[in-house]
Amino acid sequence: MKQEEIAHLANLARIRLSDEELENLEEKLSLIVEYVSVVSDIAAGDDDAAPQVGARHNVFRKDEVTNEPDQYTKDILAEMPATEGRFMAVKKILDTDSE
Amino acid sequence: MKTVAELRTAYIKGEMKPSEAVAAALAVIKEKDEEIHAFLAVYEDALEAAKAADTLYAEKGADTPPLLGVPIALKNNILMKGKKATAASKILENYTAVYDATIVEKLKAAGAIVVGATNLDEFAMGGSTENSAFGPTKNPVDTTRVPGGSSGGSAAAVAMGAVPVALGTDTGGSIRQPASYCGLVGFKPTYGAVSRYGLIAMGSSLDQAGPLTNSVADAELIHHTIAGLDKMDATTITDDTYPAVTTKDAYTFGVPRHFLKEGVDASVLEAFEQHIAVLTAAGHKVVDIELPLFEKGLAAYYIVMPAEVSSNLARYDGIRYGLSVEGDNLLDVYEKTRAEGLGAEVKRRVLLGTYVLSSGYYDAYYGKAELVRKQMRQELDEVFKTVDIILTPTAPTPAFKFGSNEDPLAMYKQDIFTVPVNLTGVPALTFPMGTVEGEGKQLPVGVQYIGPHGGDARLFHIGKAIYDERT
């Protein structure tokens, strides 16, 4: 695995990596990827397995409010890094000035 | 007082009060934890709850909740309302849980008193507790060695005598391997037996919570307290999800001999052979079995788990809670927060997961790994037609020295016997099968009993007969 490829993955994963980290990951990730590559040899044939006992399916409940108004609001707001009143504050993502 | 059962009896008879037991727990932590570092937080308010329990026992005796006044510890990736839930990560260093995990709600309802939160590998990723952002935990049996991981703090808390029970989580062996290294009982339930609501998610199709204790009976009691269908976790199962698994007077154990050929310490194999002798002497049958796919589970695990990790950890973005590092724009905030807040092993797994899920690689890695997983389940179903329990060592070695497994692959291979259990969702119990010598010290090693889906009760049944009633 090359450093450019790892830099691309880091971009997808929203993690900024230092040059040192990139170098270290090049070696370690390559080793792991090589190790796990055997799965393509292990899995025999195609997926024709019969449905299994205990296999999970979607579990639904009625679409209704299950908690009291404001039951958790104060506590959850208190954990937010930036708030304005009852709102979470985030950075602008649309640049409307350039129109 | 080493077990919950002993404590409970003493409380009911009035020989001991919960406030004395909780005070004793806090005293042990004060005395030993500076060196061991099993705890990330200690809850002094536990004493208040203990005094209330004193009064209840005085009034009602045996007519009280089954865990009333029992001091317990929680791995710090389990949410308890009003307490910090850090997952041993800088990114959640100051995060306070806003609700109780279902298992915490159940433990509280049963009267248990939480005395503290225990250390772990960051986000439960590791097998030594060396990956904690707040420093490693030492093994109370030999402080030059790791306690195992990721539930290393929970294992050390019980092993050093602070609490009779600590809760852990197990994604690939994180309850069983530290239990083995610290000489304890550890239990990983059938997937879905215990609610994951309020556990900080790592690999959602693999994670289960369970106890670390000094006896199988205690593990059973705690498991029954926390298990059950939960409307907050759609993956929880009912008693009839799987066909009934019976208990018997004499069981047939299957040993995957081929699996033990490489990478297992000779001393561990010797203890394992002695354990087989114990089983046959007790009238059980031990036969050889083949599990060719099961043996290769580790490779599939290191695809499925990081894939789920990369998805689950996407939520730590510096916006909604936890650490937030200021940046020029939104993307900058995300990238800087995650760069600063996540440790090296966590970053490695997130990137690996991103890789195996990315376009062009998905089929070759994730798709194949899920297929292997399905075929492993079929292989297990076949084997369980002829044997009742699969027998392996819990880990290939006893507790190792700090810093001796810096190569990630070497560390991952400590989980070779435990990860197939999570990949297939079956239950497994570990308890000490003996000790092996390591530089003049006697180091505990565990044996692993693997049951079929829904066979949790069978494992407790045989575990109590073999371990709790040992002579």
Image: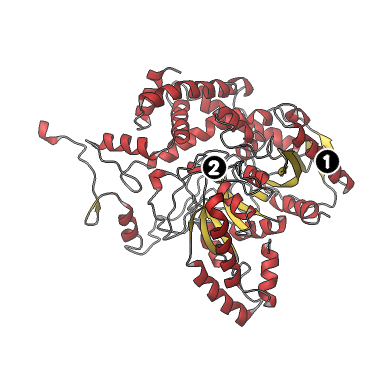
Observer-nearest residue: B398 or B386? B398
Q: Where residue B87 sits: x, y (%)?
A: 46, 47
Discs 1/2, front: 2
Residue occupied by mark 2: B129
> Left of A79 or right of it: where is B433?
right
Q: Quadrant of residue B7?
A: bottom right
Circle 1 crowding by C-alpha within 10 Å: few under 14, some 14–19, many from 20: few
Residue occupied by mark 1: B274
Farthest front residue? B440
> Left of B314 or right of it: where is B278?
right
| Res. B47 in view | yes
**Chain holding disc 1:** B
Farthest bottom residue? B59
Label 1 in the same subunit as label 2: yes
Q: Where residue B98 sits: x, y (%)?
A: 40, 58
Q: Is residue B360 above or below residue B312?
A: above
**Chain holding disc 2:** B
Q: Where residue B183 sits: x, y (%)?
A: 69, 48
Question: Which residue lies at the image location 31% right of the left edge and 60% below the top edge?
Answer: A74
Amino acid beneath label 2: Thr
Which element type, helix, strand or loop, lies under badge 1? helix
| Res. B237 in view | no
Q: Where residue B395 sits: x, y (%)?
A: 68, 38
